[in-house]
Image (cartoon, helix red, strand yellow):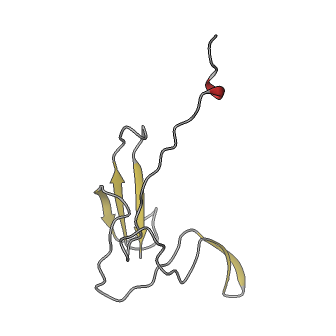
Amino acid sequence: MKTSTSEKKKKNITYEFVWPISSNTDPDNMNTSFGPRIKNNMWNFHEGIDIPASKDTPVHSMYNGVIHKCGAGDNKFSSRHVIIKIESDEKRSKPIFLVYLH
């Protein structure tokens, strides 16, 4: 008897990402979170998280990768940004892109 795809056990695939300031798996402190918020007395949607740090604090990539793009604000990003590309591997068929702004 053939087993259907839905009946097959799926593999648990995990990745160990680290936070950019502490460089460990425990979350860094955030001063602004992802999601709806009130800004200038109006509802707004914050599309990222803000992690405070002093000037010249080292920032770590969440996972091993290479810099794909970096630069000043443009038509896609409102501020300075770095995009890190994590290549596909045996766990996933497509690359992941990590985006750091400000």
Up-down relation of residue 87 to residue 57 (above or below): above
Up-down relation of residue 15 to residue 37 (above or below): above
Q: Residue at x 34, y 53 (%)?
A: 85
Q: Nearer the viewer, residue 75 or 96?
A: 96
Q: Residue at x 57, y 68 (%)?
A: 47
Name the quarter where the N terminus is drawn.
top right
Q: Horizontal placement of 77 versus 64: left or right?
A: right
Location of residue 13 in the rendering, given as x and y in whole percent from the top left corner: 48, 45
Up-down relation of residue 78 to residue 83 (above or below): below
Location of residue 86 in the rendering, given as x and y in whole percent from the top left corner: 35, 51
Name the quarter where the C terminus is drawn.
bottom left
Location of residue 9 in the rendering, given as x and y in whole percent from the top left corner: 58, 32
Q: Horizontal placement of 32 versus 22: left or right?
A: right
Q: Nearer the viewer, residue 73 or 85?
A: 85
Q: Quadrant of residue 3?
A: top right
Work out which residue is located at the far top of the displayed protein and give it.
1
Location of residue 14 in the rendering, given as x and y in whole percent from the top left corner: 47, 50
Q: Nearer the viewer, residue 62 or 70?
A: 62
Q: Residue at x 31, y 64 (%)?
A: 70
How many labels, in total?
0
Q: Nearer the viewer, residue 102 or 56?
A: 56
